[in-house]
Amino acid sequence: MTTSRQPPQDLAASLLAAALLLPGVQALADEPPQGGSISLRYLDYADRQSGLDRIRAHSPSIAVTAPVASDWSIEGTLTADDVSGASPRYHTAVSGASHMQDERKAGDIAVTRYFRRGTLTAGAAYSTEHDYVSRALSLNGTVSSEDNNTTWAFGIAGSRDRIDPVNHVVVDEHKRTLSILAGVTRVLTPNDIGQLTLTRTNGDGYLNDPYKLFDNRPRSRRQNTVLLRWNHFVDSTGGTSRLSYRYYSDSFRIRAHTLSGEYVQPLGGGWSIVPELRLYTQSAAYFYYDPVYDGTLGPPFPPGFASAEPNRLSSPDQRLSGFGAVTAGLKVQREIGKLWTVDVKVEGYEQRGNWRLFHDGSPGLAPLHARIFQVGLTRRW
Amino acid sequence: MKARIFFLLIVPALLAQAGCATVQPWEKGKLAKPEMTFGGDKLETRYADHIYTSREAASGGAGVGGGGCGCN
Amino acid sequence: MVDAVVRFPFDAMASRCEVRLAAPDGHAAEELALAAIAEVRRIERTYSRYRADSIVSRINAAAGRYSVECDAETAQLLDYADHLHRASGGLFDITSGVLRRAWDFRQPRVPHARELAPLLALVDWPAVQREDGAVFLPRTGMEIDFGGFGKEYAADRACALLQERGVRHGYVNLGGDMRFIGPQPDGRLWSIGIQDPRKADGTVASIAVSQGALTTSGDYERFFDVDGKRYCHVLNPRTGMPVSHWRSVSVLAPLAVLGGSVSTIAMLKEDGGLSFLAASGLAYFAIDGTGQAHHHSISGDYAS
């Protein structure tokens, strides 16, 4: 029995190297996306609390991606949100809820340059509604290893927002944010790919919700996230599981865990079905106060209001309370021919104080239910 | 706090080392399927981010640069 | 742009061949395919043993007499053959073609040791002298031929040409040795069947491929059976007898020329073939003499 005298890695490398020396042969290189696409999508969102309808939103949007020359691509989206309904002025108070109706228009554009081993993307976003204008810029880059199995990602972004609430609680306030991102994506096996992303955002300025009573938040907020994602292809079914876990913490002392999973199962004939489940839990902000009101003044005054210092931090915003939430959804998608894809997605969302994991959630808030419906159409070219 | 920093340094290092055998280019066929990438439908992801940012305190994770809103 | 895939079958290198590619329209597809086919025919002409004007024929005709100048392409092919000789422990030898004079696979006759001995004396790659771009075969009657990786080399060159001209989807198939340019236009992979070594129209497995090459060496291409024993065209250069350990070895590699070399060497190494395949770092699917399959890292479906 003859065996090769070279150590294994040397043999593999030397054979490939020798083969590559042959004239006019080349191993494949990666290239930027060849085709473009145009997508239309429509969202219908409605939530309820304590048996009453709260917020309703209708949102059509359009996204276009196009390759430009051989090394560039450009992407743009436009969205219009039509939001209406009643938002509680404190906690989940039904009476005295502020009725609102607003239309928000937002657009963004991003230009990407493809290099041999990486990409660079510059983006700009603009959003405007009655009382809020936001402008943002971003720069993101990726660098891949020679074998394309590892990709490092970096990003930096900033935004400047202007807030002019219709109730004139404040006038011409500003908010600025600066975010940075670092991440790595790694091909683990022919069936597995994983990703780790870290972000940090610093926000400064007016962070209060002007439509909530006694909402006085710090003027700065530092936020951190750690996101782990894993996609796995299941050979036996041809389906793909997509799992992710995000840990969030910020200077409001809110800690949140998000665990979500979806499973893409192709059914043949261009159909696929995607069930999804998302579990969320968060702690309350340190300045959030429960719906326990001042003994003398009654709701909505926080306890000890009369004797407290005037600029004391507080907020009765349910979004800053401690709670757990579950989303369950199903998407059905059909690929028609080689160019078209259409999908329909239905989700239900419920948020409850006592669903908070590991610790007690904030008491006294009625559960929030939402139903979400989406339909989308994409054409490739 | 120290444990958290340690964790944040170790996991990327592990991820970078993980996957004992290098996956060859011609084995990446399945990874090219859209459902195996991390992008996802752009508009669908946007809607999800927007809904969760306006109903929960946590935000962000996968990317930076989206811009804000007075979400109510 | 999602284009239709067009097929261009043709015959070359004594095999059924095919170029399959996606192009914006029929005209463009035809032009591209013809260019690829022309490249395959060029290599066939240049390195054919049967054409008096080919470089290989001129080198063989000068055996024992004088050295012949080679162009850069031939010199590099000879370098590669030399590398394979060393990597295979001397089993891959491009001077072993002379053994064909004793083995005529059109009749089921096992040659005698007496007939093989003088031919084996001519199988000696280390004796071949290469200097300053010229090659000299020292003994009269010695021959070189690139049959061991010529088809695969042609497949790689044809694909490189198509890639340079912007083809992103398709493959070149030369007698079962395939080099892929890219997946099908809609992103789906090509599903390729690995032939059953004992059933001409059967497959033992199918593999999903998008890039790289799938090459197969087998004992079913040219062979005869005597007394239940198979004698195939892959001959051991030291004994002059066919190898018998493997029925077929299929390899997935970034280049067809690499895959073809590795699958041929694995056949030649017989029971040392598995460790050689493992050392090569490539994905493989091999079927041994008992019909049992051995495989590594091949992504795809298996049908038994």
Image (cartoon, rainbow, N blue to C red):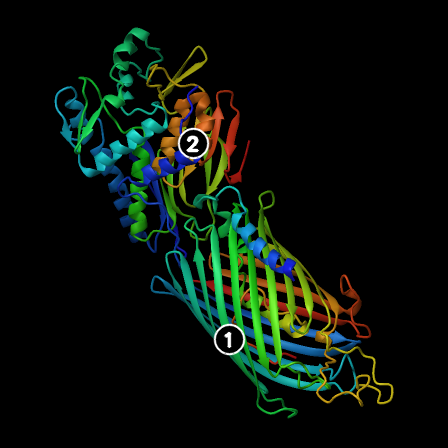
| Above or below: residue A34 compared with residue C243 | below
Residue A252 located left or right of residue A112: right
Image quarter of residue C257? top left
Residue C285 seen anywhere in this rendered image of the structure:
yes
The quarter of the picture where the C terminus of chain B appears is bottom right
Q: Which residue is drawn at 66% across and 69% down?
A: A372
Image coords of residue C302 (percent x, y):
54, 35
Q: Residues within 10 Å of mark 2 (few under 14, many from 20)?
A: few
Q: Name the chain letter of the residue that bears numbered label 1.
A: A
The percent coordinates of residue A172 (x first, y second) are 57, 90
Residue type indicated by callout 1: Gly
Q: Can residue C200 be seen in this view?
A: no
On residue A7, the disc is: 2
Most distant residue in the right direction: A295
Q: Nearer the viewer, residue C244 or B16?
A: B16
Residue C299, x across and y down, in percent: 51, 40
- Residue drawn at point x = 27 percent, y = 41 percent: C37
Q: In this view, does A207 lie above or below B29?
A: below
The amino acid on which the numbered mark 2 sits, given as a three-letter code, is Pro
* Quarter-of-image position of residue B24: top left
Image disc number at residue A74: none
Q: In percent of the image, x 51 and y 34: which residue is there?
A: C296
Find residue A158 and name its label.
1
The x and y percentages for residue C132 are: 16, 33
Mark positioned earlier in the residue sequence (2 or 1): 2
